[in-house]
Image (cartoon, rainbow, N blue to C red):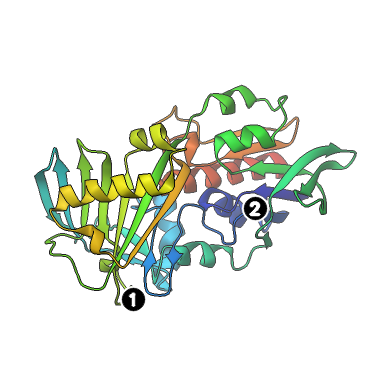
Amino acid sequence: MKIAIIGAGISGLTAAINLDESADVTLFEKSRGAGGRICTRYTDSYTFDHGAQFFTARTPEFKEFLKPLIKLGVIDNWKARFIEVKNNTIINRQQWNDDDLPHYVGVPSMSSIGKFLAKNLNIKLNTEVSIQKSAMGWEVVGFDGEVFGDYDWVISSIPAEQSSKLLPDYFSYYDALKQKKMLGCYSLMLGFDEALDLDWDAAQLSGTDISWISVNSSKPERPNDYSVLVHSTNDWAEEHLDDDADAVKEYLCSQVAEIIGQNVYSAQHIDLHRWRYANVPKQDKNTLFIDPESKLAACGDWCNKGRIEEAFRSGFDLAKEMNNILFN
């Protein structure tokens, strides 16, 4: 049984890990690394986790999945000084020491997680593909024309909008895919020679166009740089996804400076990343879409809620359902 999984984010990696012993699985990922939005931007002097900032584990299955990552030091608990800010007023302040609900990050970077999960899988990076029906099942073809052969099943774990372009319109859940709407976000990356005067490491904000500010270098086992990561709100990003990048940087810098009361234009490094598919409003309790007749399926955090644990849950549930279909 040959299975092609398109997309090597957490849902795709989880599905592959849980199907790999019972099928011949190949992952196709258009980016240069696995992990999706669990990723890190490297510069000569600074590193930035410019996607997902941290994650928690609430379900027994996810906690079990994370045990080897904890044991081998792939993830660690970020004991941040955390604040919540509403309309420029701090409304909550706490120290993340909670052993009952650790705030996990990859070490020494978030991208370490994807690298670890992918290391024993058959994965083709820098490979964007399409699929077409064939006599043997589904033929996977690279955008450069390379033919990767026929597969019995295809699983799409890429964002819903991209899945609706990849999968044919007779996929049983095609209309559901078309109705899913993922939201954008901008990541602003600031690198400084000297530390800013902040008495917190991470801030969640409301009442402004900024949703998150954190001292990236406060996470465990980070380099000795001073790096700050900023996320815009999804609503603001949606209105400005196609704006000029320099104008976006200028506006977000001005907002950060106003919030923290310090000059961020003194940063030695200023960079921007646009996430067109970053988050999703909480959905109905579907964690996956599977069509045994066409032998197509789709999964991802967008099926339910834009969280890392939801991405895991979607891939885990899909693999479990497919194993039931294939071997029962």
Give the image location of residue 270, x and y in percent: 35, 60
Q: For residue 156, what is the image quadrant?
A: top right
Give the image location of residue 294, x and y in percent: 75, 32
Label 1: which secondary element: loop
Taking the spot 46% from the left edge, 63% from the top edge, the residue there is 111
* On screen, residue 131 above or below 111: above
Residue 105: tell me if it is visible.
Answer: yes
- The residue that label 2 is drawn on is 19
Q: Amino acid at mark 2?
A: Leu
Q: Nearer the viewer, residue 143 or 117?
A: 143
Q: How many marks?
A: 2
- The residue that label 1 is drawn on is 223
Give the image location of residue 87, x and y in percent: 13, 37
Taking the spot 67% from the left edge, 25% from the top edge, the residue there is 172
Give the image location of residue 261, x and y in percent: 12, 53
Looking at the image, residue 190 sits to the left or right of residue 324; the answer is: left
